[in-house]
């Protein structure tokens, strides 16, 4: 039995405020695609190049120790927000 690949996605692909996210079986839709946006506004790092702290960006291109948020690939490009008091209903 093959284990499905799971991703974080917008439930029902609804591009409206406060739509719940879920862990869903990967289907490749825009509702399951995210763009990493760094708080410094400098965009994507160069893979394998030193960042401002002298640390080398890993081959997958994340900036170690840098603040970021995730922006949806749906048309309104909403930002993922995690609420500490959220319930999974």
Image: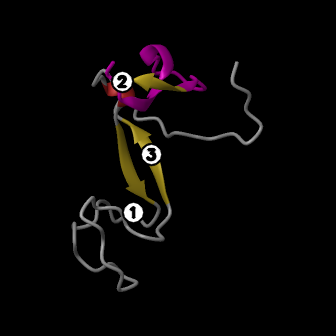
* Mark 2 nearby-residue class (10 Å; few <14, some 14–19, many ≥20): few
Residue sitting at 46 percent across and 35 percent down?
78
- Residues at discs 1 and 3 in contact (Cβ within 8 Å): no
Q: Is residue 71 left or right of residue 61?
A: right
Label 1 vs label 3, nearer the camera: 3
Residue sitting at 34 percent across and 66 percent down?
42
Q: Which corner quadrant holds the C terminus?
A: top right
- Residues at discs 2 and 3 in contact (Cβ within 8 Å): no
Which label sits on residue 88? Answer: none
Residue 29 percent coordinates (x, y): 30, 22
Which residue position is annotated with label 2? 4
Q: Which residue is most to the front?
A: 1
Q: CA distance from mark 1 to mark 2?
A: 35 Å
Q: Is residue 47 left or right of residue 21?
A: left
Which residue position is annotated with label 1? 41
Which residue position is annotated with label 3? 70
């Amino acid at each position: 039995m093959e284990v499905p690949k799971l991703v974080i996605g917008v439930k029902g692909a609804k591009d409206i405020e406060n739509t719940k996210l879920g862990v869903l079986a990967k289907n490749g839709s825009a509702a399951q695609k995210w763009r990493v946006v760094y708080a410094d506004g400098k965009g994507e790092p160069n893979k394998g190049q030193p960042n401002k702290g002298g640390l080398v960006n890993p081959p997958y291109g994340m900036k170690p120790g840098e603040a970021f948020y995730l922006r949806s690939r749906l048309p309104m490009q909403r930002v993922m927000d995690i609420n500490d008091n959220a319930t999974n209903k």
